């Protein structure tokens, strides 16, 4: 019998697991996919928001500002790629200027520091590639860009180091209350636990409604994105939003922390919680809107497109805390934007709830630091030479577009909660994420995976399940 | 720092021929740096025949063709390093590379020959909407899996794009027992060689649908099907022409992109049409002593032409080094004349000619923008037409060439530009 079962190994589940791992507790994270960071957390804008967007007084606003403030320390402790590049909300017509001022006021009320309203000239001096039709902007220096994959992986790894268990390919099918806690039925086996944390993303309503009579509804809100080549990654330096509308923050143009350019998203409410397919209309819409923000969007540099699903709760608010009618069932539901930013704060909040209820005591030997995958590119020439002498696998470049070595891939596979698939390797090391989109390196990464995991090439998948890559030997 | 006279980046067909040619023109210290585990480049996975008709007057397979040059490299004791990735080339021609035996190292070159080849355009670059399941391969990746790793990527195949690799893979997959259901091509004409359409599609009753594209990809884990639609003359899908094809594999053969990341970083001027370096008659780029040949310069249809070009680059690099060693002036008198591609010509290689430096004649290779039947290739020296050659048919997928004579160029007083264009009948 576990003390706590956390359902979902996205950024929210990982953050909760990490915070909970500070305490003496027997906990396990159940994840329906083969890896951490497989749902909403893997397909979003990868932005650490400043916190002026959510309405004052909401949990969203509070978690956003608190999460943002935690980021500097967290990325240092857990070795996560992050850059505080700042954001601009640009205003494209005089009519929208009051909205900009409203955002400014709201930001101040929410406790966002260093906000500043800029004139057109100031904006264009800061970002010369923006459209001439901009009339002004709200500048938030505290906003940043992050690697959402390694953000989630890092927190999960650290939680694991500190004793939290993880069970992958484990889909919760039913939850039944009993006197001391809950039976959690899954496609694998039945788990028993005293407490449950629901961090199931777009499925958080399904999980919640298995237990509670106060039903909630999460609507998957799809967003299509484009990623552009690093050659044009510095088109803008800051994250550029437009004045938000009813369906979200509108289309943004931003550098990624790894130097690409990201453009998107759309916002379409759908039914299917797995429907991450892009549409022509969606991609066209992204292009049209982004073209209003920047001059000459270099579309021939697009290297890939994808869609993500926001876990949009119909009341547009985070639902965090014990369900009213279900003792011991703690929700972390409706975590849509600014969910990535808020995750660390949500982690603390949920861990506090559990600490209070369960009377948890702190561990003496909590490990606060986690070291990421060694990236030889960040070493000096002399250090690189030494590394390759000691570990020659760092001398073999596997992914030529992103210069990822065999050493990094082997590390990604063998570290705690290591990669099991091409996508797992890709999200941890960037092998296959570059301009050729894994054309050259995928057969090599498959070979390394097969060798290191003692598996057959026939069993290697793109992302677990039935996503095998080759089907049989040739004749 | 160790010095070589000529460092060749890439040990594929272009790099091999360039290295051999540089050695044969008197250069002792030639080094080939190759990122893969063997020399030969992409030829190693091209196990079909049809190579060498121009150069050897016989039909060879890819590996056989490569072997002729690899044998020559061995025979001439040209040095090479395998599994070696070049990370950077400085403007001063210091080459930084890495491999597991030598670690990270730097070499000084007097001349550099760029022969890195090209990569395949990916699904992402095409913006095809839909899911992102397993089972989507660029044709070259599939070819590697089948011919080198000996694994089948799938059983039921749809191919988008009629580039040569896709056509070759249609036949290869069929011979391995897979069902190739259709080849869809966005353009109203094929992107591959005529002979490949006949030998790889027609002979196996594989339908080629021109003016068609993939408009949706289905399947969440492994691809389960694609939707194909007819497109209008602007390439936009036409509503209600959609057809569903179930498949477990989508192969893309939608174009090749020269891999010029190293070239760009060292400041080489790139032509946005070819995505390759701008070169003069000596195949020298905008950086002195840096030459380019093969698919890194512009995408070739036949390896034979890449070889011929590379031999030329190797010879010119040798000449450059010999002058460098003589310490004589590197500058040659006379201005460079621009070659302008116009009216039906997409690009030319080279783009500049120095009459004083050119051989008795120089071959200008080019591609046309559209299909032309019974048209003329015409060449103007400033306003004066000096060549008007009839071609029965010219298509964008087949490279064309025309020879310019030094005598004719030299005879033209104060020549400023050479213009090449297509003239319709």
Image (spheres, rainbow, N blue to C red):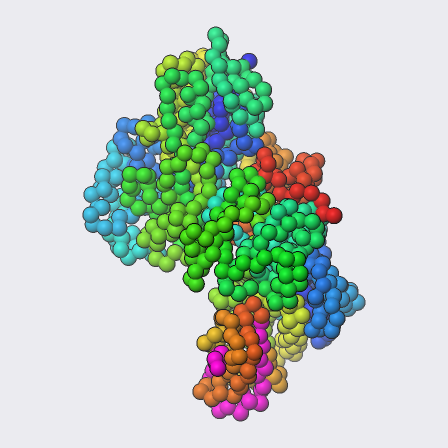
* Image coords of residue A296 (percent x, y): 37, 58
The verdict on residue A430 being magenta is: no
Residue at horizontal 43 percent and vertical 31 percent from the top? A202
The relative height of residue B406 versus residue B301 in the rendered view (above or below) is: below
Q: Is residue B387 at all visible to an observer of this figure?
A: yes
* Image coords of residue B282 (percent x, y): 59, 76
Residue at horizontal 29 percent and vertical 42 percent from the top? A244
The relative height of residue A114 versus residue A363 in the rendered view (above or below) is: below
Q: Quadrant of the N terminus of chain B?
A: bottom right
Is A380 on the left-hand or right-hand side of A317?
right
Which range of residues does the magenta coloring cover?
Answer: B399-425
The relative height of residue B316 versus residue A51 in the rendered view (above or below) is: below
Seen as rendered, the residue at the extreme right is B75
Q: Quadrant of residue A330?
A: top left
Q: How many marks?
A: 0
Residue at horizontal 54 percent and vertical 53 percent from the top? B122
Residue at horizontal 44 percent and vertical 34 percent from the top? A272
Q: Quadrant of residue A334?
A: top left
The verdict on residue B403 being magenta is: yes
* Image coords of residue A55 (percent x, y): 27, 32
The relative height of residue B238 versus residue A282 in the rendered view (above or below) is: below
* Image coords of residue B393 (percent x, y): 56, 75
Seen as rendered, the residue at the extreme top is A179
Q: Is residue B28 at all visible to an observer of this figure?
A: no
Is B47 on the left-hand or right-hand side of B420?
right
User: Which residue is more in the foreground, A351 or A40?
Assistant: A40
Is A138 on the left-hand or right-hand side of B117?
left
User: Which residue is more in the foreground, B30 or A263?
Assistant: A263
């Amino acid at each position: 019998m576990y003390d706590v079962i956390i359902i979902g190994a996205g950024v929210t589940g990982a953050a909760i697991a990490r915070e909970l791992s500070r305490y003496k507790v027997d906990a396990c994270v159940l994840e329906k996919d083969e890896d951490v960071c497989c749902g909403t957390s893997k397909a979003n804008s990868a932005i650490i928001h400043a916190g002026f967007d959510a309405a004052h007084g909401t949990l969203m606003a509070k978690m956003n500002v608190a999460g943002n403030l935690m980021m500097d320390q967290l990325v240092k402790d857990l070795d996560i790629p992050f850059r505080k590049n700042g954001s601009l909300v640009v205003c494209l017509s005089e009519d929208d200027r009051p909205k900009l001022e409203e955002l400014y006021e709201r930001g101040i009320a929410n406790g966002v520091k260093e906000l500043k309203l800029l004139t057109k000239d100031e904006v264009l001096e800061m970002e010369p590639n923006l459209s001439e039709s901009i009339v002004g902007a709200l500048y938030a220096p505290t906003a940043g860009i992050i690697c959402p994959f390694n953000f989630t992986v890092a927190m999960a790894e650290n939680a694991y180091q500190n004793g939290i268990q993880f069970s992958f390919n484990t889909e919760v099918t039913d939850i039944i209350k009993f006197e001391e806690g809950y039976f959690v039925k899954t496609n694998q086996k039945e788990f028993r636990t005293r407490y449950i944390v629901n961090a199931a993303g777009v499925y958080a309503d399904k999980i919640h409604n298995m237990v509670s009579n106060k039903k909630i509804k999460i609507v998957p809100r799809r967003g299509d994105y484009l990623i552009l080549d690093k050659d044009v990654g510095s088109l803008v330096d800051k994250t550029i939003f437009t004045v938000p509308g009813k369906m979200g923050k509108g289309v943004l143009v931003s550098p990624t922390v790894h130097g690409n350019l990201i453009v998107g998203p759309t916002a379409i409410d759908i039914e299917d919680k797995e429907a991450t397919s892009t549409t022509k209309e969606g991609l066209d819409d992204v292009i049209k809107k982004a073209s209003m923000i920047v001059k000459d969007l270099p579309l021939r540099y697009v290297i890939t497109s994808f869609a993500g699903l926001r876990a949009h709760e119909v009341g547009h608010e985070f639902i965090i805390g014990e369900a009213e009618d279900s003792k011991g069932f703690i929700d972390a539901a409706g975590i849509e934007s600014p969910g990535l930013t808020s995750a660390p704060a949500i982690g603390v909040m949920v861990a506090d709830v559990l600490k209070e209820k369960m009377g948890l005591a702190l561990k003496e030997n909590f490990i606060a630091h986690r070291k990421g995958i060694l990236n030889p590119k960040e070493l000096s020439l002399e250090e690189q030479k030494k590394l390759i002498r000691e570990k020659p696998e760092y001398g073999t470049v596997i992914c030529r577009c992103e210069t990822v070595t065999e050493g990094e891939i082997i590390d990604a596979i063998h570290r705690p909660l290591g990669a099991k698939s091409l996508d797992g390797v890709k999200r941890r090391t960037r092998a296959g994420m570059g301009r050729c989109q894994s054309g050259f390196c995928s057969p090599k990464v498959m070979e390394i995976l097969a060798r290191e995991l003692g598996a057959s090439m026939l069993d290697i998948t793109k992302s677990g399940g039935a996503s095998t890559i080759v089907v049989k030997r040739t004749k | 720092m160790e010095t070589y006279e000529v460092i060749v980046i890439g040990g594929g067909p272009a790099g091999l021929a360039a290295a051999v040619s540089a050695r044969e023109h008197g250069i002792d210290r030639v080094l080939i740096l190759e990122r893969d585990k063997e020399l030969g480049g992409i030829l190693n996975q091209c196990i079909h025949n049809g190579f060498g008709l121009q150069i050897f007057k016989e039909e060879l397979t890819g590996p056989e063709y490569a072997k002729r040059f690899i044998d020559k490299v061995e025979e001439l004791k040209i040095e090479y390093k395998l599994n070696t990735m070049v990370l950077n080339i400085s403007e001063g021609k210091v080459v930084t590379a890495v491999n597991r035996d030598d670690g990270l190292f730097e070499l000084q070159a007097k001349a550099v020959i760029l022969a890195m080849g090209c990569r395949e355009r990916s699904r992402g670059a095409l913006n095809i909407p839909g899911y992102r399941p397993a089972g989507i391969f660029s044709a070259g990746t599939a070819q590697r899996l089948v011919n080198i790793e000996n694994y089948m990527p799938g059983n039921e195949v749809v191919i988008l794009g009629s580039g040569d690799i896709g056509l070759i893979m249609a036949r290869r997959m069929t011979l391995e027992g897979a069902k190739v259901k259709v080849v869809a091509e966005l353009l109203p004409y094929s992107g591959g060689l005529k002979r490949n359409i006949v030998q790889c599609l027609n002979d196996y009753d594989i339908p080629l649908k021109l003016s068609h594209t993939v408009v949706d990809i289905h399947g969440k884990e492994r691809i389960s099907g694609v939707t194909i639609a007819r497109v209008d003359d602007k390439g936009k899908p036409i509503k209600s022409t959609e057809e569903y094809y179930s498949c477990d594999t989508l192969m893309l053969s939608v174009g090749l992109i020269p891999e010029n990341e190293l070239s760009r970083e060292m400041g080489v001027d790139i032509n946005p049409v070819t995505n390759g370096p701008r070169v003069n008659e000596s195949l020298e780029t905008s950086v002195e002593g840096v030459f380019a040949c093969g698919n890194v310069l512009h995408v070739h249809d036949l390896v034979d032409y890449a070889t011929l070009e590379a031999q030329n680059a190797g010879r010119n690099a040798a000449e450059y080094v010999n002058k460098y060693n003589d310490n004589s002036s590197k500058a040659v008198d006379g201005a460079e004349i621009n070659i302008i591609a116009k009216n039906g010509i997409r690009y030319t290689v080279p783009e500049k000619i120095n009459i004083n430096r050119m051989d008795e004649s120089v071959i200008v290779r080019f591609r046309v923008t559209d299909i032309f039947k019974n048209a003329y290739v015409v060449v103007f020296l400033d306003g004066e037409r000096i060549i008007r050659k009839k071609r029965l048919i010219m298509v964008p997928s087949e490279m064309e060439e025309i020879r310019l004579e030094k005598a004719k160029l030299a005879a033209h007083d104060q020549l400023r530009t050479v213009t090449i264009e297509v003239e319709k009948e």
